[in-house]
Image (cartoon, rainbow, N blue to C red):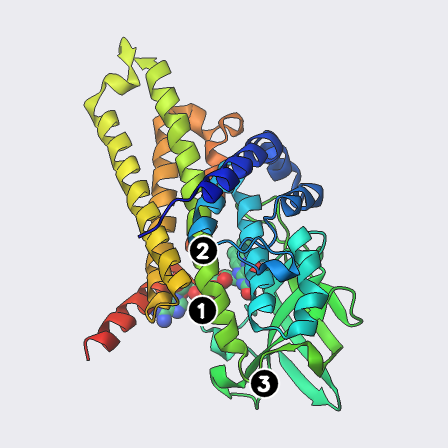
């Protein structure tokens, strides 16, 4: 069972203050102008949000996964897109902290914790999304270097990041998940370039671009773990990423629910407040129930991560799928409760709906989450 400590309450309070004073007042403008607010990210770094569960010897906050769920929910109430980017950045920082050697940890993690050096996670390719083990980006060994060629698709933070963790094939073509290694490519390495920023439905305050590798040469010593460990490292990173993305969804939806609670008591139709209609009260009750259930499932998954439980991947997938679906539905219900106003930019609800939609797709689609959960059930029933 999760114990809510004084330490967590203090951190969540500081995050709430940051979210309400730095993120929330600017979220609409950053969305409209497609501005990636790197200054605000550096401020988040000063609060310890660049390495929430990174170890303290490299500057991390050393908090639990359960703490992270509470933190990302609170951050997302200010701006779901920026909270979601910080979640991805944390995943990358953690991968280097957890699987890197001492030199790698000391080289890359402190700047990431400060968020002066941003991180990108490079797995998806134009021809390999859900089937991530089918990636073809290659890292060919030449002496003490790898020479990387290929294209990564939909990479968050691309072009602004200082640290790219790239999953590339070091084994033969067709060698599947065991032929993949995780390699750190610093921004600015010759041969590294980026596609244009994608035009998206939401998540406009962070860039999504292709990352293109044209004979990109990095030392073999940039590889995390052993050759062939990359797929396992990528999936372990995603376990936590999925829980945090679920928490970001929860925060956005909780914010939308709070707006709806105000609106239905102020707005009148047919001579009475909207809230005087039983069907509207039922809608609010359904939203609250779904969000509480999502919160409990996310905390359960986070506890399993903290305990390193054997069924952690399934618990994270289950929570991600449930939380991102429940949150999207709740935010959409909040939009409906606002009537025509819900469709206007000035109320902010439509932005949250647009932003939350992609959480059902990335870090593994919700269909893939069901596959992970169902297969785990079947394996345990053998
Ligand atoms: C805004 C944005 C940001 C992103 N950021 C990153 C990032 O930073 N790093 C990164 O590596 N990737 C990132 N992604 C990529 C994202 O993780 C992939 O888009 C996602 O994993 C789905 O892959 P795909 O788009 O290739 O869809 P596909 O794999 O082609 O799937 C298409 C549809 O088929 C379904 N499907 C596929 N296989 C099955 C199956 N076996 N059973 C049932 N249904 C199936 C899927 O659920 C989906 O509905 C990002 C994507 C977006 C949109």
The residue that label 3 is drawn on is 227
Q: Is residue 72 left or right of residue 280?
A: right
Label 2: state its secondary structure: helix
**Counting other residues with Cα less than 10 Å from the Cα at mark 1, is it few (<14), some (14-19), or many (20 or more)?**
some
N-terminal-most mark, 2 or 3: 2
The residue that label 2 is drawn on is 65
> Looking at mark 1, is its residue's CB closer than 8 Å to ligand 1?
yes
N-terminal-most mark, 3 or 1: 1
Question: Which mark lies nearer to you, 3 or 1?
Answer: 3
The residue that label 1 is drawn on is 130
Residue 92 place in picture, x, y as percent: 58, 62
Q: Is residue 299 left or right of residue 108?
A: left
Q: Using the rendered image of the protein, determine whether residue 220 is visible from the camera's viewpoint.
A: yes
N-terminal-most mark, 2 or 1: 2
Label 3: state its secondary structure: loop
- Using the image, determine if residue 71 lies above or below residue 57: above
Q: Looking at the image, which residue is at 49% across and 45% down?
A: 71
Cα gap from disc 2 to disc 3, whole angstroms: 28 Å
């Amino acid at each position: 069972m999760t114990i809510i400590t004084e330490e967590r309450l203090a951190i969540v309070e500081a995050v709430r203050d940051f979210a309400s004073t730095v993120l929330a007042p600017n979220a609409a403008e950053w969305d409209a102008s497609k501005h990636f607010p790197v200054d605000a990210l550096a401020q988040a770094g000063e609060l310890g949000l660049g390495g929430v569960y990174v170890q303290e010897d490299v500057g991390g906050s050393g908090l639990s996964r359960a703490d992270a769920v509470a933190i990302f929910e609170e951050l997302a109430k200010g701006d779901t897109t920026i909270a979601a980017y910080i979640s991805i950045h944390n995943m990358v920082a953690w991968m280097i902290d957890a699987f890197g050697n001492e030199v790698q940890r000391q080289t890359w993690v402190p700047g990431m914790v400060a968020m002066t050096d941003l991180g990108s996670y490079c797995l998806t390719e134009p021809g390999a999304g859900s089937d991530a083990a089918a990636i073809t980006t290659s890292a060919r060994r030449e002496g003490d270097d790898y020479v990387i060629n290929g294209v990564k698709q939909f990479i968050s933070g691309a072009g602004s990041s200082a640290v790219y963790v790239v999953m590339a094939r070091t084994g033969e073509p067709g060698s599947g998940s065991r032929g993949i290694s995780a390699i750190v490519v610093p921004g600015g390495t010759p041969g590294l370039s980026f596609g244009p920023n994608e035009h998206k439905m939401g998540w406009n305050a962070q860039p999504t671009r292709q990352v293109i590798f044209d004979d990109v040469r990095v030392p073999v010593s940039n590889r995390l773990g052993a050759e062939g460990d990359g797929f396992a490292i990528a999936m372990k990173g995603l376990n936590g990423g999925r829980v945090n993305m679920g928490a970001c969804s929860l925060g956005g939806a909780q914010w939308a629910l709070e707006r709806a609670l105000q609106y239905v008591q102020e707005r009148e139709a047919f001579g009475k407040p909207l809230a005087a209609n039983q069907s509207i009260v039922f809608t609010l009750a359904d939203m609250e129930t779904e969000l509480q259930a999502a919160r409990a499932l996310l905390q359960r998954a986070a506890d399993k991560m903290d305990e390193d439980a054997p069924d952690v991947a399934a618990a994270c997938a289950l929570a991600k799928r449930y939380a991102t679906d429940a949150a999207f539905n709740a935010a959409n219900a909040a939009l409906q409760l606002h009537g025509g106003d819900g469709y206007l930019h000035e109320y902010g609800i439509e932005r949250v709906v647009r932003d939350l939609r992609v959480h059902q797709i990335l870090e593994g689609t919700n269909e893939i989450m069901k596959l992970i959960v169902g297969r785990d059930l079947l394996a345990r029933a053998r």
